[in-house]
Amino acid sequence: MNNKKSRHKLSIRVLKITIIMVILMSIYEYSKSFILPSITLWQSHLITIIISGIIAAMVSYFVFRKENNFLNEILNEQKHKTEYEKQLEATIAELTTAKSEINALEGLLPICSFCKSIRNEDGQWVSIEKYIRSNSGADFSHSVCPVCMKKHYPQIDNQ
């Protein structure tokens, strides 16, 4: 639940309880002379203090109970936020590791039509193997395809 929204609800509840308390005390003060006509001023003040204390205790109980629920919600949200932050940190660490392991070649590469050399960032022409090795971390294992085997080594080709 949104903290600001919870505080607003709590403030509205306290305001309602305060208004109800003021109305009840006003009714009590007005009706006191009819209910207890023979009491002294001192006794009247004592009864008012006792009733005010009882109402204040009731209001405090309800307000603090609601405030306790509000604090529990905040603690739960903080706990979940901490868990999410830990998960996020783990995900960031995984992505950072994956990014360091992946070196992708992208964009247009200027390549010679004849010898297949590639022009690097410094303007130097390097072999395709050297360029890919230095820019991607990949390594090469040389072999001969069947077409080139027939063309260049016809005596070895048994197929």
Image: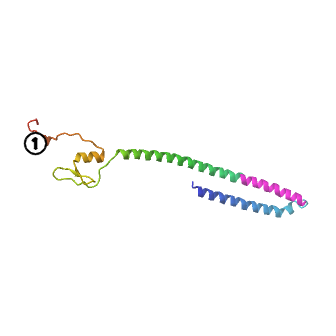
The secondary structure making up most of the magenta span is helix
Which quadrant of the rendered structure holds the C terminus?
top left
> 71 or 43: which is nearer to us?
71
Instruction: Look at the numbered disc 1 and give the secondary structure of its residue.
Output: helix
| Residue drawn at 56 percent across, 49 percent down | 78
Instruction: State whether residue 154 is above or below residue 3.
Output: above
| Mark 1 closeness class: few <14, some 14–19, many ≥20 residues within 10 Å | few
Is residue 13 placed above or below 139 in the rendered structure? below
Taking the magenta stretch, the answer to whether it contains residue 143 is no
Residue placed at 41% from the left, 44% from the top?
94
Please state which amino acid type lies under the numbered disc 1. Answer: Lys
Residue 98 spot, x, y in % from top left:
38, 45
Q: Quadrant where the N terminus lies?
A: bottom right
Left or right, 145 with respect to 11, comes to left
Residue 15 or residue 83, whichever sits in front: 83
Quarter where residue 44 is shown: bottom right
Q: Residue at x 27, y 42 (%)?
A: 139
Indicate the position of residue 155 as horizontal and vertical percent values.
8, 36
Q: Is residue 45 left or right of residue 60?
A: right
Residue 25, image x, y percentages = 78, 61
In the rendered view, tell whether residue 92 sits above or below residue 9. Answer: above
> What is the quadrant of residue 147 in the picture?
top left
| Horizontal arrangement in the rendering, residue 18 relative to residue 46 (left or right) | left
Disc 1 designates what residue?
A: 151
Q: Is residue 152 above or below residue 5?
A: above
Q: Tell me which segment is drawn in magenta.
A: 40-60
